[in-house]
Structure formats: C-alpha cells, structure tokens
Image (cartoon, rainbow, N blue to C red):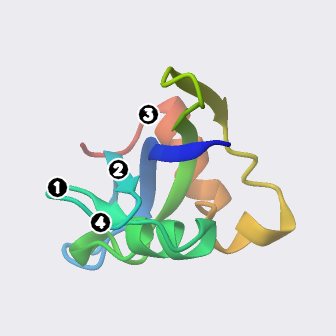
Amino acid sequence: MKNLVLIQISGILAGRMWMPADYAWKEFNVKFVPGGHHFAREWHGMRDALDDITNDGDFSSVGIVEAMIKVSWRSDRNTTITRAQGLNLGAKALRDFKADPKAVEAYFFGGLEE
C-alpha cells in the first residue's frame, strides 16, 4: 500500500500582469500534502492545484511556461519513493493554464521583466 507524502509543483509563470499592465515572469514552487499542513495546501487534484498557482494576485492573468511535478509516497517498508517529470501543458486538461505564445516566446528569448 502506498501512502502519499508530498506533491510538489514548480515552474515558471509568464504573461501580461494585471498591474502594471506589462509582460513579466516569476518562479513558483507549491507543496501539497494530505490533510493540509503548515506552509502547504491540501491536495484536491491537478486542476485545483494549477488554478491556485495561476490565480496569484497581479499574476492572475498569466499562464504556466513550464512546470515540473514531483510526487513522494511511503511504501509498506517505510521507505520514501519520489518520482518527478515535466508537465505536458499541451494536454487537453491543462491547456487552460498554459501561457500565451507571446509570453512563452518573450520568456525564452528575452523581453520580460522579472
């Protein structure tokens, strides 16, 4: 039996900010744990997690340029196992959270404020 220990999503948000109305980017790193915990949110699924990440104050109208998800669980032998992989932002379920092409291009080729 596997017991979830931690889900961590990290990456880059980029796009047109609310104020000042200009293109910008920032890194994010969010941790989710079962039952909630100090400095971490309770996991309610991928869509809820990405919604929380992309609804961030002045950055609420931006999207995700790239992201990595890391999942850790404890096995029956009480060892912690961790797997990490990049998120496929082209997947149908995640398209709503992908940064617009102009923001992605500006992030990778310059032109965005940090």
How much space separates mark 1 and mark 4, taking CA atoms? 9 Å
Q: On the rendered structure, is 44 left or right of 85? A: left
Q: Which residue is mark 4?
A: 36
Determine whether the residue tagged by mark 4 lies in a helix, strand or loop: loop
Nearer the camera: disc 1 or disc 3: 1
Specify the label residue 39 is tagged with. 1
Q: On the rendered structure, is 18 left or right of 79? A: left
Nearer-N-terminus badge (3/2): 2
Quarter holding residue 6: top left
How much space separates mark 2 and mark 4, taking CA atoms? 10 Å
Nearer the camera: disc 4 or disc 3: 4
How much space separates mark 1 and mark 3, taking CA atoms? 33 Å
Q: Amino acid at mark 3?
A: Gly
Q: Are marks 2 and 4 in contact (CB under 8 Å)?
A: no
Q: Amino acid at mark 4?
A: Gly
Quarter containing the C terminus = top left
Determine whether the residue tagged by mark 3 lies in a helix, strand or loop: loop
Nearer the camera: disc 1 or disc 4: 4
Residue 8 visible somewhere in the drawing: no
Specify the label residue 110 is tagged with. 3
Q: Are marks 1 and 4 in contact (CB under 8 Å)?
A: no
Nearer-N-terminus badge (1/3): 1
Q: Please tell me which residue lies in front, 81 or 8.
A: 81
Which residue appears farthest toward the front when viewing the image?
A: 77
Determine whether the residue tagged by mark 1 lies in a helix, strand or loop: loop
How much space separates mark 1 and mark 2, taking CA atoms? 8 Å
Determine whether the residue tagged by mark 2 lies in a helix, strand or loop: strand
- Coordinates of residue 13 in the picture (x, y in percent): 43, 53
Q: Amino acid at mark 1?
A: Phe
